[in-house]
Image (cartoon, grey):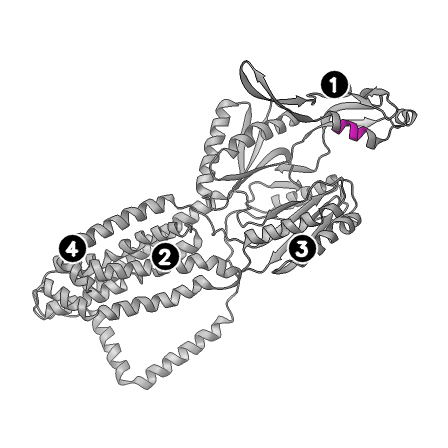
């Protein structure tokens, strides 16, 4: 079936088709998430275990090696990286890239569960997480207050701010940096315990028994059935001090008779500093697939609401990773529009007919906009890779339309009517246009099936380019001949004078055709010289970008104390502030709270 002839004779279906595709593409564009780079699914699983007060050597022998032996035999494991610290161990298991990440997660979970009985009993179950490329914080906030002390401010951040931010769509996690954590400290009196023949383990066991809630079944209350539970927890340090602990010989003793119970804060494990001043900071993370711009916008609205409801607390943004993404998106869209405009100007310069230019230029938006529908359908995002793909093919999208228009114009110069010229010209070069399009598809599609980590990124690049190119083929075969048949007019003169630029171009072409050997030799020399320059170009996976931020990572020797780390961090901050144009320095020392 000749689709071009059908579209020319019955233009309404083709017009309605592209109206629907354009509307759907615009809606898909608005619904597609905006990110810096696409989220890639890496089959990397991290096992974390902690046992406070345990030396690194003991953590290695009793925890790390047993877990390593359990996961080493899993199918597809490429390598294992273990990091052992005081009381903590982190084991990263890297699988082959073709391994399904969910399957890798299940395999590791089952392997760790199989050796759980061999691990120290007092240790909590190891946490198993999947590595994600979306782990960078979208925003980092600081909380300040003149009314609240550090303890109350930390509690406010954990209880109020975190809950409000987690309710924002797309927020995947809220981590506090710095501040303090409330802790009920029980300091045992060893002499009194020795007199009563009570060990610290006995006290710990009895506290666990009395400090618990248990189900109590169901009961009839006012004619209705209600769940019943036994509550044996306390709400203050004073209540905890009055708890009676049963001894092995049948006697009972109050906790405050053998220990000092105080309501205080835990030992600091992290400190957040803004320009050298201690603050309570908050890292806001997004979920996989969420738009960084939408998350940042939602968080800013939540901060404004918190300011209204809690005027005594000031929340400020110290690190904003969403604004560079927005600027990159805006510049990419501007580059896309700029490229489209230049392509239209070049078409007009050569065709020198505004009607033919309009028909050819229509292929640009009608190819790009429906491509967004495919981008959204495949679960892609608007990121550096997909926008680069569209910017790269924007000049290619009008190729098929230009070929169609040029051939139709040739038939018009033969004296044919626009309708007959469009019918005959479209039928004449139909196969050539299709072959050209699929040749371009054959160039870009293999990038979607590249191997390794680069292939994870270029999957969206290849498919986005192919979708736009196939949309341009639909425009060239359905819309361009139809628009030409009803918009183009027969030329007033069968021949037209060439412009000076075209005259020089034709003269150069004539010289090349008469001196083929020299032309081919010059092309070969130019190609060899170009290849020789390739080795001088720097290589890298992702080019560095100037975002106005620089990150410095410091790692001290094992066993270094928090004050020692703070001193080194302060020296680094002062050195950074001595650099011209540095506005502020934010420091996060230690682990997250």
Assess whether mark 1 and mark 4 are in contact (beta carbons under 8 angstroms).
no
Give the magenta range.
203-208
Q: Position of residue 302 (x, y in %)?
A: 48, 31
Main SS category, magenta section: helix
Asked if residue 463 lies left or right of residue 4, the reply is right
Residue at the location (60% across, 23% down)? 146
Q: CA distance from mark 4 to mark 1?
A: 84 Å
Q: Which residue is mark 1?
A: 238
**Dot placed on the residue nearer the N-terminal end, 3 or 1:** 3
Mark number for residue 11?
4
Disc 1 crowd, CA 10 A, few/some/many (<14, 14-19, 20+): few
* Closest to the observer, 385 or 147: 385
Q: CA distance from mark 2 to mark 4?
A: 28 Å
**Dot placed on the residue nearer the N-terminal end, 3 or 4:** 4
Q: Which residue is mark 2?
A: 390
Residue at the location (34% across, 67% down)? 440
Instruction: In the rendered view, tell whether residue 562 sits above or below residue 502.
Output: above
Asked if residue 566 lies left or right of residue 162, the reply is right
* Closest to the observer, 507 or 302: 302
Q: Which residue is mark 3?
A: 71
Q: CA distance from mark 3 to mark 4?
A: 63 Å
**Dot placed on the residue nearer the N-terminal end, 2 or 1:** 1
Assess whether mark 2 and mark 3 are in contact (beta carbons under 8 angstroms).
no
Asked if residue 538 lies left or right of residue 237, the reply is left
Disc 4 crowd, CA 10 A, few/some/many (<14, 14-19, 20+): some
Q: Position of residue 463 (x, y in %)?
A: 39, 59
């Amino acid at each position: 079936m000749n689709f071009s002839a059908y579209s020319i004779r019955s233009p309404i279906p083709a017009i309605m088709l592209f109206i629907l595709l354009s509307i759907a593409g615009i809606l898909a564009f608005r619904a597609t998430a905006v990110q810096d780079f696409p989220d890639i699914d890496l089959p990397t699983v991290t096992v974390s275990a902690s046992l406070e007060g345990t030396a690194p050597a003991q953590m290695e022998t009793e925890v790390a090696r047993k877990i390593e032996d359990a996961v080493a035999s899993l199918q597809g494991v490429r390598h294992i990286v273990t990091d052992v610290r005081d009381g903590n161990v982190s084991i990263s298991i890297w699988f082959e890239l073709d391994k399904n990440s969910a399957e890798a997660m299940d395999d590791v979970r089952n392997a760790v569960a199989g050796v759980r009985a061999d691990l120290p009993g007092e240790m909590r179950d190891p946490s198993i997480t999947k590595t994600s490329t979306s782990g960078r914080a979208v925003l980092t906030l600081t909380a300040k207050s003149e009314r609240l002390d550090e303890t109350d401010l930390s509690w406010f951040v954990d209880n109020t701010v975190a809950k409000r931010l987690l309710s924002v769509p797309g927020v995947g996690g809220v981590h506090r940096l710095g501040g303090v954590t409330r802790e009920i400290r029980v300091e045992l009196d060893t002499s009194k315990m020795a007199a009563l023949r009570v060990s610290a383990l006995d006290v710990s066991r009895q506290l666990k028994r009395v400090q618990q809630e248990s189900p109590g079944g169901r009961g009839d209350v006012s004619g209705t059935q209600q769940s019943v539970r036994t509550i044996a927890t306390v709400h203050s340090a004073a209540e905890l001090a009055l708890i009676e602990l049963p001894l092995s010989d049948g006697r009972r003793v109050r906790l405050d008779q053998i220990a000092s119970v105080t309501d205080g804060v835990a030992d600091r494990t992290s400190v957040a500093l803004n320009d050298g001043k201690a603050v309570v900071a908050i890292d806001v993370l997004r979920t996989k697939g969420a738009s960084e711009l939408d998350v940042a916008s939602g968080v800013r609205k939540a901060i404004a609401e918190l300011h209204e409801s809690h005027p005594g607390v000031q929340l400020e943004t110290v690190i904003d990773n969403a604004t560079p993404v927005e600027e990159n998106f805006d510049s990419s869209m501007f580059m896309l529009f700029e490229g489209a405009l230049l392509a239209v100007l070049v078409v007009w310069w050569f065709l020198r007919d505004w009607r033919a230019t309009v028909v050819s230029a229509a292929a640009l938006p009608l190819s790009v906009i429906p491509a967004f529908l495919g981008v959204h359908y495949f679960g892609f995002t608007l990121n550096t890779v997909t926008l680069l793909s569209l910017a790269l093919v924007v000049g290619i999208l009008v190729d098929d339309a230009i070929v169609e228009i040029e051939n139709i114009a040739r038939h018009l110069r033969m004296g044919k009517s626009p309708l007959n010229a469009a019918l005959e010209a479209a039928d004449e070069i139909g196969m050539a246009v299709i072959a050209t399009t699929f040749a371009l598809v054959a160039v870009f599609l293999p990038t979607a099936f590249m191997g390794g980590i680069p292939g994870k990124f270029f999957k969206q690049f290849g498919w986005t380019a192919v979708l736009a190119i196939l949309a341009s083929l639909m425009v060239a075969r359905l819309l361009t001949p139809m628009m030409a048949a009803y918009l183009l007019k027969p030329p007033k003169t069968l021949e037209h004078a060439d412009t000076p630029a075209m005259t020089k171009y034709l003269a150069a072409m004539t010289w090349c055709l008469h001196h083929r050997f020299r032309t081919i030799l010059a092309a070969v020399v130019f190609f060899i010289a170009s290849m020789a320059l390739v080795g001088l170009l720097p290589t890298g996976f992702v080019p560095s970008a100037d975002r106005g931020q620089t990150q410095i990572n410091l790692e001290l020797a094992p066993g270094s104390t928090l004050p020692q780390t703070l001193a080194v961090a302060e020296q680094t901050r002062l050195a950074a502030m001595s650099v011209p144009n540095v506005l502020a320095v934010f420091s996060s020392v230690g682990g997250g709270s």
